[in-house]
Image (spheres, rainbow, N blue to C red):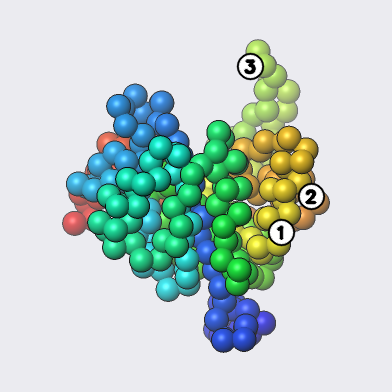
Amino acid sequence: MKQNHPGSFFIIMADGELKITAVIPAGGSGRRMQASEAKQYLLLDGIPLLVHTLRSFQESPVIGNIILVVPPADVARIQSDLVDAFAMTKIRRVVAGGKARQDSVRNGLAVLPADCEIVLIHDAARPFVSPALIEKAVNGAVREGAVAAGVRARDTVKQCDREGRVTATLDREQIWMAQTPQAFHRAIIVAAHQKAQIDNFYGTDDALLVERMGIPVRMIDSIPDNMKITTAEDLAWAEYRFSIRK
């Protein structure tokens, strides 16, 4: 490993470059959005939300390849209407997703390029991911093996039972709200998904699958705008963010 400048780390391979692939699961139905089309295809600032997300990885100098995972019925049209139409040249494969997000990520991992060393996984519905955050996640994975972006809890955190009664007040200094990107050494994340499949275990994020193997995951600070677009109110907020950036 070579340190090029403070905070930046790269694995030196035969050709001197780190091989990094981004897996973007975009198989959501968008039920909470209450729209006729899946949320990743809804227009944001005049173009599909998914395109904004993909452009961040297309334009990132540290990303070599992108694996896009979409609903099975959408594979053909996404290749023509999105990948080709918006010149997403780093997208090497558009593959069919599975029943759950975890199944879709696993399908993406199954077609990683042979020389891929680091895998970065990012939600399609987080369109404001920045090049700096992508690089921070990659650098963290090189150094730590497994990292996840997130934000530290600002409010007091209460643990409750199913009836809403408080059972504990947690130390917010130790609480993070996990987001994506999450980045891993290839062998770690592939093994974690394989074990989860064997155990028929479904987790809420990819980092959890790594954690249950006893491998530590390091949290890294995210950025304020990196929220997930889930509801119509979120989409309206995203439109506002784009309007004030112009």
Q: Are marks 3 and 2 in contact (CB under 8 Å)?
A: no
Please report the residue visible at 55 percent of the width from the left and 33 percent of the height from the top.
99
**Residue 172 relative to residue 240: left or right:** right
Which of pointers 2 and 1 lies earlier in the amino acid sequence? 1
* Residue that numbered label 2 is attached to: 213
Question: Label 2 is placed on what type of residue?
Answer: Met
> Pointer 2 and pointer 1: residues touching (CB < 8 Å)?
yes
- On the image, the x and y values in percent for residue 228 come to 43, 42
Q: Is residue 171 visible?
A: yes
Disc 1 marks a residue whose amino acid type is Ile
Q: Which residue is mark 3?
A: 164
Residue 209 coordinates in the image, percent (x, y): 70, 46
Is residue 227 in sight in this rendering? no
Looking at the rendered image, the disc whose residue lies closer to the viewer, 3 or 2, is 2
**Residue picked out by circle 1:** 188
Residue 192 x, y percent position in the rendering: 72, 50
Residue type beneath disc 3: Gly
